[in-house]
Amino acid sequence: MSNDPLFRPLKVGAIELSHRVVMAPLTRMRAAQPGDIPHALNAEYYAQRASKGGLLITEATDITAQAHGYPLVPGIYTRAQMEGWSAVTKAVHAKGGFIFTQLWHVGRISHSSMQPNGALPVAPSAVPASGTHMTAAFETVPFETPRALETHELADIVADFAQAALNARKAGFDGVEVHGANGYLLDQFLRTGSNKRSDRYGGSIENRARLLLEVVDAVIESIGAGRVGVRLSPWGSFNDMYDEDGSLLWEFVISELDKRDIAYLHVIEPRSDFTSDTAPLDANAPDAAASFKALFRGAFISAGGYLPDTARATVANGKADAIAFGRPFISNPDLPERIRVGAELTPHDRSTFYGGGREGYTDYPTMQQTVEV
Ligand code: 8OZ
């Protein structure tokens, strides 16, 4: 057994990882058009980042056309999308890796130019996020006021998540991660800043958590708890999120998830701002892993501005079981191996994060290739 805490096996629900360096979900906006379809370039990108016994989580993936809120992101609700993803999962499995897909509904973080029939985006309440968003044509515009979902529509959204999970398994994914973070639909329901409802999906913490928990229950019913993860961003402010609950909301949600025996909980630390490479980590932010690890018995994955040393220390201290890396995984396809041997990391180029082709996507070198050049 390795002395390095990051390179010890870890049971994550139905799968067993051989190391704890996880690839975080990363929006890259490179699906084939029309149809938001994963294609060969995407398969090459994920395969490059796969490692034996390692876990990749895909970019956030639309569960329906209504869930869509950024140009060029993939879906998992059409046959062509499922075929595209099948090639991705085959390529990752061929390298001995595991891959979960992140199931996404953006809620109010969309624009009518990207909605079916030019409809307004939907949300818990008719409260726009402050600030600007992009249109289908990448123009910057203020957020529109979304349409508040009717109570009877929520059962359809729950069913859409369950169907997407089934589609994911048919496409060869080892499991799914429910995107409950970063100000998208499920987070919009959780938090008082965006949820002003007076039905049983608004008001108390229990009511605001209802949609997320119904989604998780339906996804469990569809593919089994051992193949389900959930991502949360406690106290996160991205996409104009805030709430008035302090720790209580998160303690309630995490305790409820614990009861359901899901494979993992994936928590983003509020100290990190992933939209900037210059903002220092916020030393005064609360520590989500320290606050919540004890409430959850499944695998606990922590994300948020980790470096190899801080990742190792966090797992060694028992504050998390595994660490998700985002930006370092973009620019280091062989990140787990580099961390294992203590190799230098290639810095990333933010200008090629979103949209485009191979550049900044599949052309970052492995250690081997760096030596050869
Ligand atoms: C960055 C750009 C677009 C989307 C998230 C899915 O915040 C995202 C996302 C991040 O979870």
Image: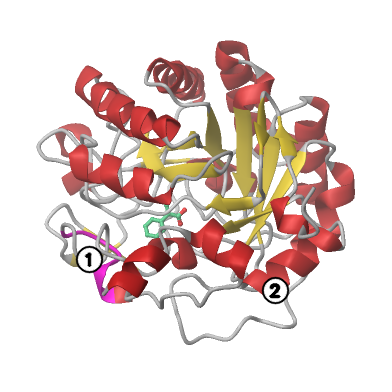
Q: Which residue is mark 2?
A: 309
Q: Is residue 28 magenta?
A: no
Identified at 81% across, 58% down, the residue is: 3
Ligand 1 shows up in the quarter that is bottom left
The C terminus, quarter of image: bottom left
Q: Amino acid at mark 1?
A: Val
Q: Amino acid at mark 2?
A: Asp
Identified at 27% across, 45% down, the residue is: 44
Of labels 1 and 2, earlier in sequence is: 1
Task: Determine the image quadrant of residue 246.
Answer: bottom right
Q: Which residue is mark 1?
A: 141
Identified at 67% across, 62% down, the residue is: 235
Number of numbered discs: 2
Image location (x, y in percent) of residue 90? 36, 27
Q: Main secondary structure of the magenta part?
A: loop
Image location (x, y in percent) of residue 243? 67, 59
Q: Is residue 198 visible?
A: no
